[in-house]
């Protein structure tokens, strides 16, 4: 994608349905003509003027209709952090993206037209060599987010101070990096130089869930994705996720999901 601060526009392709990206954030802009969206193991009907905001490594399957219109905006975390300094709710999407919530927005037709025009202008600038191109693209991107922000379904729990939010962001980043080898809250608390009690309290204040649940959710997202969309057997998935014995993983999965990994695979 070039420079890590770039933002680029990519089309949906008639013969391609899977749009998982391992490195970049995505905004999926489905203007019209789409039937269904699957993200990890969650599936829902698409509608006109639908936007989904996705963090990397989410399994994405899009079912288009005969005629469809839309595009994908891909950008790095650095781009969002450095170029979008406004306090927008959609920037909190990364915090909640592992809790069964898919950050999605349904725009009115009028706002949908404006967002569509913004994506076209971003795409036009990305292929040009005019002076101040990057600043222009960043400005258009921020404008797009402003239009989306009031419709975003993301909500943090109550009034959260910035220090607490920053701690939770760091914690979630560590969990996403180490959940296959570190399953205990105290391991992450040590890395963050706080007590497990403090970490759990702050996570509850910001997200309304326990610190342990973030670890569990990351493991379950990975497990469900591998069981559903890969040819790996249960033993391989268990070892990949850091379980010393497959039956420990099976017990964990059944406790969290209500069914065994084998039964889930057959659903």
Image (tube, grey):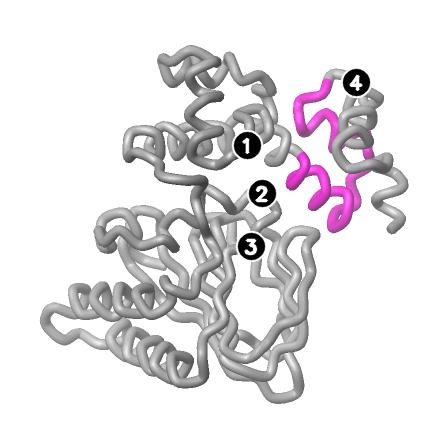
Q: According to the image, label 2 marks what residue?
A: 99
Q: Secondary structure at mark 3?
A: loop
Name the spot of residue 73 as percent of width and height, x first: 41, 66
> In the image, 201: left or right of 135?
right
> In the image, 232: left or right of 109?
right
Number of the front mark, 1 or 2 = 1
Q: Residues in magenta?
A: 220-243
- Please name whichever residue, 261 or 245, is drawn nearer the observer in this view of the structure: 261
| Magenta part, dominant SS | helix
Are there few (<14), some (14-19), or many (20+) residues within 10 Å of tag 1?
some
Which of pointers 3 and 1 lies earlier in the amino acid sequence? Answer: 3
Residue 259, compared with residue 70, is above or below; it is above
At a point 57% along the width and 62% down the height, the residue shown is 19
On residue 168, the disc is none
Name the spot of residue 217 as percent of width and height, x first: 62, 35
> In the image, 100: left or right of 79?
right
Which of pointers 1 and 2 lies earlier in the amino acid sequence? Answer: 2
Q: Secondary structure at mark 2?
A: loop
């Amino acid at each position: 994608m070039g420079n890590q601060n770039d933002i680029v526009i990519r089309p949906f392709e008639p013969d391609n349905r899977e749009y998982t990206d391992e490195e970049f954030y995505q905004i999926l802009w489905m203007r019209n003509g789409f039937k269904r969206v699957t993200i990890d193991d969650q599936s829902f009907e698409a509608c006109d003027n639908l936007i989904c905001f996705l963090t990397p490594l989410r399994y994405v399957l899009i079912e288009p209709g005969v005629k469809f219109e839309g595009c994908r905006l891909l950008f790095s975390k650095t781009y969002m952090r450095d170029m979008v300094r406004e306090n927008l709710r959609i920037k909190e999407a990364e915090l909640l993206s592992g809790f069964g919530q898919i950050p999605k927005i349904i725009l009115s037709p009028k706002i949908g037209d404006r967002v569509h025009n913004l994506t076209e202008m971003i795409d036009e600038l990305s292929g040009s060599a005019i002076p101040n191109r990057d600043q222009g693209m960043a400005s258009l991107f921020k404008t797009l987010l402003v239009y989306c922000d009031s419709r975003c379904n993301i909500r943090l729990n109550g009034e959260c101070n910035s220090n607490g939010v920053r701690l939770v962001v760091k914690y979630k980043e560590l969990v996403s990096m180490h959940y296959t080898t570190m399953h205990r809250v105290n391991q992450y608390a040590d890395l963050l130089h706080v007590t497990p009690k403090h970490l759990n309290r702050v996570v509850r204040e910001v997200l309304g869930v326990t610190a342990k649940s973030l670890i569990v959710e990351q493991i379950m997202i990975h497990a469900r994705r591998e069981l559903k969309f890969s040819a790996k057997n249960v033993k391989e998935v268990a070892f990949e996720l850091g379980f010393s014995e497959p039956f420990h993983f099976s017990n964990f999965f059944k406790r969290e999901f209500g069914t065994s990994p084998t039964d889930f695979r057959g659903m």
